[in-house]
Amino acid sequence: MRSVPNDDTDAPPLADLMPWSVAPPRLGRSWPAGPDPASLRARWDALLTARGPDRETLFEPTRARTAHSAVGQLPGHPGGAERLVRAEGPCPEPVRALVAPFDEQWLIPDQRLIDAARPELWRIADDRQVFVTETPTGPGPLLLATTLFPVLRTGRVRPLFRRPGGREPNLAPGLTEYLGTRLGGTAPEPVDVLAWILSAVRADLTVPLTGDPARWALGVASGRRALWLMRRDGERPKLPGGRRPYVRAPLPARPGELRYDRDEETLYLGEGRISPVPVDAWDFEAGGVRVLEEWFLARTGEPEPGTLSAIRPASWPQSWTSELLELITVLALLADLPPLPDGPVPSPVTTADLRAAGVVPVPASARRPASVLDVPEEGPEGQLALI
């Protein structure tokens, strides 16, 4: 477990700067998520075609969820609320989700399928939201940021905003105003504070803050670049110098092996060949795991026969190739981001400074979710949820 210093002269912990956090969602079974939305719909149909004990077995029950569990509708998604053992109808429309570091897949948004869905996160998930997740110890980024719903096996999830529509930042009350005073200008935007956090966070999850405008601008620029690459929204990233990974030999229908040639900067997927693939992209790790290998394994690993996870594309879709080419570019650009200068930050903003300004300790209410229930939510068996 990462320790957090208590010294008031040291950098404040992330847990004080972004005080509201939620345990990561827990699927409990792998089949409701996958890299291909059509396969998820086929899995749903196979589940509902089965009857009685067969449906229960296919569902893969756990102590937290069975086909007989009574749970409410997932906020923001019009799925059914009857017990899954009696469920009928089409599959809820799959949504994009981050299921592993830098691995964007699809998820069936139905609380009956998920052991711990964390409804408080679904209530505030929209295109303005940024979810920050703590990664396990090991080489790679300490924090990941995504606009997609995160279902990673990581540490705590810290949303940037406490309410939908980018309202009420999940930052210590008074933090941005105090930083604006120290920086000699207006209060920074919440996304700029997040950008600084991404660029400056330390291994113990403390975040050195600075009152020096030049150093602040440097860290924010680096963090914004990392944030843009991790969120992957808007304009597609490109490697400098006109370099671009291409498919040099067609990928087979079912590539069985992934290997890399460092001298040729070439990635082989069976007989398929992609280049140039920078060494930094191949070596990029998150949580101590090589990202490209895990991404490939998620699409080619052999599932247990007879399970819903065994329903998958018969051949390698073209969309996966496009996603892989973009992922290679993203990882290479992230690896190329220059780190902030070593050593203490100039004009440090310490925990003691924040304490004197009344920013910390944060009020208990800042560590709890905001009340955002603007419309009724359907509870188990169609009843209205009371929260």
Image (cartoon, rainbow, N blue to C red):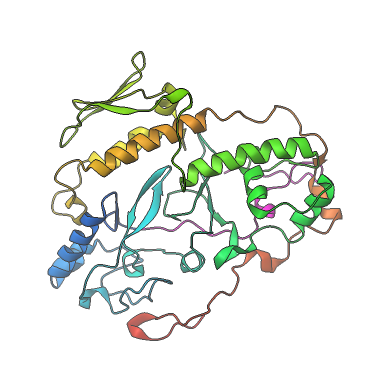
Residue 150 in picture, x, y percent from top left: 44, 54
| Residue projecting furthest to the bottom | 383
Spot occupied by residue 178 in the image (x, y as percentages of width and height): 81, 53
Magenta segment, prevailing SS (helix, strand or loop): loop
Q: Is residue 59 visible?
A: yes
Give the residue displayed 84% in from the left and 47% down from the top. Answer: 184
Quarter occupied by the N terminus: top right
Q: Is residue 30 above or below residue 72?
A: above
Q: Is residue 143 visible?
A: no
Classify residue 223 by image quadrant.
top right
Give the camera-side residue of 27 and 327: 327
Is residue 261 or residue 50 the one in the foreground? 261
Placement of 5 over or under 242, stated as above or below: below
> Residue 112 placed where, x, y %?
32, 69
- Magenta-span inclusion, residue 16: yes
Q: Residue at x 36, y 22 (%)?
A: 276
46 on left or right of 206: left
Q: Tell me which residue sits at (20%, 46%) in the image.
A: 303
Q: Which residues are magenta?
A: 1-27
Q: Position of residue 260 (x, y in %)?
A: 31, 22
Q: Is residue 27 left or right of residue 272?
A: right
Q: Is residue 340 left or right of residue 82?
A: right
Query: In this view of the protein, which residue sits in the foreground, 65 or 297?
Result: 297
Q: Quadrant of residue 236?
A: top left
Q: Quadrant of residue 300?
A: top left
Query: Looking at the picture, does residue 122 appear above or below residue 220?
Result: below
Q: Of 224 and 198, which appears nearest the observer?
A: 224
Q: Is residue 384 magenta?
A: no
